Amino acid sequence: MMEVVGLVGLVLVAGGWAITIIRRSPPPPLDLTAVYFAGSIALTAYAAWERDAVFTALNAASALLSLVNIFRALRRVKV
């Protein structure tokens, strides 16, 4: 039962990130997103090491979506 709760949380957290991308909302600040991305990568590795499928998937999805936001933020930067 608790795994279902974890999966619902995964969908809601990753869905929140995805909605901001789909709506084409401005990306979060680049420095915040870069730190979040690095943290998500570290937490993905940790969750995989612990064999926690829900948190591995959640953190991998968060890392991927924050990477998308990094690219979005970099495109907005005028050189």
Image: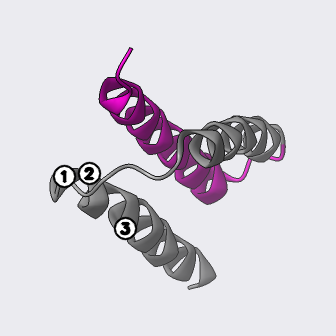
Residue under label 1: 24
Looking at the rendering, which quadrant does residue 1 occupy? bottom right
Q: Position of residue 79 (x, y in %)?
A: 39, 14
Residue under label 2: 21
| Disc nearer the start of the sequence (3/2) | 3
Q: CA distance from mark 3 to mark 2?
A: 9 Å
**Residue at position x 47%, y 53% in the image:** 28
Q: Which residues are magenta?
A: 50-79
Q: Are marks 1 and 2 in contact (CB under 8 Å)?
A: yes
In the image, residue 13 above or below residue 42: below
Secondary structure at numbered mark 3:
helix
Point out the frontmost of discs 3 and 2. Answer: 2
In the image, residue 1 above or below residue 24: below
Amino acid type, callout 2: Ile
In the image, residue 31 above or below residue 8: above
**Observer-nearest of 52 and 42:** 42
- Relative to 27, is 41 on the left or the right? right
Q: CA distance from mark 3 to mark 1?
A: 13 Å
Residue under label 3: 16
Q: Are marks 3 and 1 in contact (CB under 8 Å)?
A: no
**Residue at position x 32%, y 32% in the image:** 76
Secondary structure at numbered mark 2:
helix
Q: CA distance from mark 1 to mark 2?
A: 5 Å
**Residue at position x 64%, y 56% in the image:** 55
Amino acid type, callout 1: Arg
Q: In this view, which residue lies farthest toward the front?
A: 79
Q: Position of residue 71 (x, y in %)?
A: 39, 27
Is 57 covered by the magenta stretch? yes
> Mark 3 packing: few (<14 Cα in 10 Å), some, or many (20+)?
few
